[in-house]
Image (tube, rainbow, N blue to C red):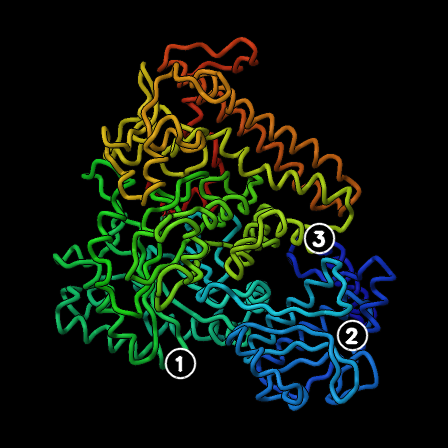
Amino acid sequence: MSRFFAFLLTFALISGSGLALAEDGYRMWLRYDPIENTSLRNDYRSQLRHLVVDSQSPTIDAAVKELRMGLGGLLDRELAERDNLARRGNLVIGTPESSELIASLDLEDRLAQVGPEGFILEETRINRRPATIVAAQSDVGVLYGVYHLLRLLQTGETIDGLNVSSAPKVQHRMVNHWDNLDRLVERGYAGLSLWDWGSLPNHRDPRYTDYARMNASLGINATVINNVNADPRILSDQFLEKVAVLADTFRPYGIKMYLSINFDSPRAFGDLDTADPLDPGVRQWWKDRAEKVYEYIPDFGGFLVKADSEGQPGPHGYGRTHADGANMLAEALEPFGGLVFWRAFVYDPEQEDRFREAYDEFMPLDGKFKDSVILQIKNGPIDFQPREPFSPLFGGLKDTNIMLELQVTQEYFGFSYHLAYQGPLFEEVLQADTYAKGEGSTVGRILGNEVFEYKHTGMAGVINPGTDRNWTGHPFVQSSWYVYGRMAWDYELTSEQIADEWMRMTFSHDRRFLDPVGEIMEISREAGVNYRNPLGLTHLYAQGHHYGPAPWYAEADRLDWTAAYYHRASETGIGFDRTETGSNAVEQYHEPVRELFADLDRVPEDFMLWFHHVDWDHEMESGRTLWEELVHKYYKGVEQVEAMQRKWDQVEGLIDQQRFEHVKALLEIQLRDAIRWRDSCVLYFSSVSGRPIPEQYPQPEHDLEHYKKLERTFYVPDPWHPASRSRALN
Ligand code: BDP
């Protein structure tokens, strides 16, 4: 090939892909396109003229790289870098320990207040020269400060007179991946696993670094890269060598590596014929393996464990308790400072009410876990449903470290096909008041360690990005990743405020975009509740894929995986009685929450059918009967999706066509599915209650039999889609 031709080809490829990639969503919220408002841009330019860095470390280098990219892009000019002060326009970053310039400011007391990961951003003077500083006790604090500064620019805030102190309210801010070693992602809807085991450890895909950047920009400081349904091979030397390369890549970004382990590993490795946690051989096995892990990854974070849950092995198999199992692992990790995250997601078909189980199993063990064990608890008592009351373990466990687990990947929210910003859900959980120590004992404050005195607390978000160019499948799933990270840093931020930030960083500052799309985001979660399971109904999904409806689903080996188990609909009424006349799960809450949930006249209607079996003719707040209200909500859910579509249509031309059209098409799918959900549910409940769908509503297009047939055939038609191949349990 002639050199000229090669040049042409390369040029065509670069410019071609540049165009194609321009707005494919890869850059997520770190886009750094030039700021359009020129007067604002000029202000920023004069304040941030020179980047002054007089220290060096892998993390400081990462911060510098980000500033080069971020300021270079946003201010549309190359950043001037130097190691001493200029007369004007200095941006100085560093810690007192390593930077003489920062040390000269005597910030120690103030930095002590924001702690090891916090930071201070300030407009000040150093040696009488004007400077904007990003200062912290640690390099990673500096990095977080740099991302904060960039965010201010990205969201169009003034930095004149800048004066910000920020510290994370929660200690372990973790993301969890449910990635299998064959690269299929359990409940992941955005392609294959990011971790390319075949080319690791040799090839460091640049995506690994971009992944770390995204997380670090939110303050995420921990990742668990493999599925909780763990393949024991993750602890083999072969995999550890690969994992070590990922850990090396994430380290400068302050992200610690953790792994999900399989409790039966000593057996699976063929070394022992038991995994009994009290067996000395087993204990030694774990100590040896832990030592090995630390040889590969000296700052390894620890293990995440799903044990005695959904068929996973655990201590119960050997007649031992969760505490025996967790403490044994903690002992193995202790010499290296590692932690054990032990999941509280347990339930058993023999029990009367799945709601009760985690609490009943773990409360008697409160105080029996070692200090380096943390119980990881899903937000609700069942399983990431569109709406759940908070798990009573929050506020229940006083002497056991705890962690909140939230789900970003939309397992129960329409996968990567539906728009369902999770901010309102996360906010609802974090602001729920447990009354554990009187009013104000919110889940957020408990996690912030303001209520009890835990040794560790944290939050985990199940994120599941994959090889899709835009990481998350639906462009708006990015917003849920974003809001998770921001709330893990500060649970007091509101969902609305964070949505606004995200939209500005990801799409546009134009009010004509922000207003309608902000409304779409705020409404989207409630719409999803309304067209699936309003008024406290739950888990009406078809078995296996958790996508489409099957409220009629009643026969199965495990009744606790059927819809009928949850809704208990009959001719006379609907809902699960969890008061004294039923399973009495309400007793797990503190007063006055218990009384509120137990009282049919006072229970918030959003939670009504979670706690009560209610007559179809029960009068609701609106004056409608329960049956009418239920139908009303289902129809409302569909109307809300239609409103979302209309609002989205308004923003055409205000953003790139590529993402506009992607979202538009997905909203069409969402509307189709919302109608199917509504019609399946109203027809089914009508058949059970013997009540007709009131005439004012358009009647479903088909009969119930039609919708029943769709159950297994329609929803995940692509057999190669990871969702349809993932381990489908319940
Ligand atoms: C459920 C999922 C299942 C997970 C399980 C878990 O359906 O795939 O393995 O949770 O969290 O939501 O362990």
> Which residue type carries mark 3?
Arg
Which residue was labeled with disc 1? 298
Query: For numbered disc 2, what is the local secondary structure?
Result: loop
Task: Kindly report the distance in space between the C-alpha atoms of the residues bearing marks 1 and 2.
Answer: 38 Å
Amino acid, disc 1: Pro
Expressed as whole percent of the image width and height from the top left, the position of residue 286 reads 24, 72
- Asked whether residue 608 is in view, the answer is yes
Residue located beneath label 3 in the image:
504
Which of the image's four quarters has the N terminus?
bottom right
Q: Nearer the viewer, residue 308 or 5?
A: 308
Quadrant that contains the C terminus: top left
Residue 373 vertical placement versus 184 (above, below): below
Compare marks 1 and 2 and give the one earlier in the sequence: 2
Q: Which sits earlier in the primary sequence, circle 1 or circle 3?
A: 1
Residue 48: image tag: 2
Q: Residue shown at 61%/54% (left/top)?
A: 469
For image coordinates 33% across by 47% down, the residue present is 392
Q: Residues within 10 Å of mark 2 (few under 14, many from 20)?
A: many
Quarter occupied by residue 59:
bottom right
* First reached walking from the N terminus: tag 2 or tag 3: 2
Element carrying mark 3? helix
State the image coordinates of residue 196 (x, y, percent, origin top left).
Answer: 48, 64
Cα gap from disc 1 to disc 3, whole angstroms? 39 Å
The residue shown at (75%, 70%) is 161
Few, some or many C-alpha atoms within 10 Å of disc 1 (few <14, some 14-19, many ≥20)? Answer: few
Picture coordinates of residue 41, whole percent (x, y)? 83, 64
